[in-house]
Amino acid sequence: MKVGDLVRYDHPVWGQLIGLVLYVDKAGGTLRVFCGNEVRWFVTSGCEVISEEAAMDLFERARIR
């Protein structure tokens, strides 16, 4: 993963989160990500790089619920 990637993070409490990678901490195994209206840390092993189309699909499904 690299800065600028869109990632999906399956969080055990908050569910699926989507964010934009701002910083990669390889040594710590984490990503600094802009998610919603805040900056968060995601665990790299729980993340998957997704396409813009996949992100929009997830947003659309969440909006319909």
Image (cartoon, rainbow, N blue to C red):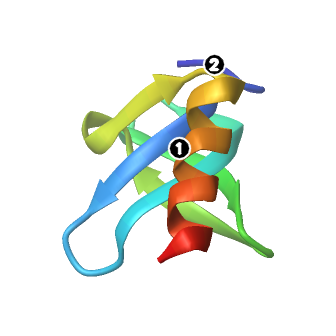
Instruction: Give the quarter of the image for residue 48.
Output: top left
Q: Which residue is mark 1?
A: 31
Residue 25 against residue 3 in the figure, above or below: below
Q: Is residue 61 left or right of residue 59?
A: left
Please rate how many residues cluster around mark 1, counting C-alpha atoms within 10 Å: few if below 14, some from 14 to 19, many from 20: many
**Amino acid under disc 2:** Lys
**Amino acid under disc 1:** Leu
Residue 55 against residue 58 in the figure, above or below: above
Q: Is residue 63 left or right of residue 46?
A: right
Q: Which residue is mark 2?
A: 2
Residue 26 against residue 36 in the figure, above or below: above
Q: Is residue 33 left or right of residue 48?
A: right
Residue 65 against residue 49 in the figure, above or below: below
Residue 25 picture location, percent across and down? 52, 36
Residue 29 picture location, percent across and down? 35, 38
- Distance of label 1 from label 2 (alpha carbons): 9 Å
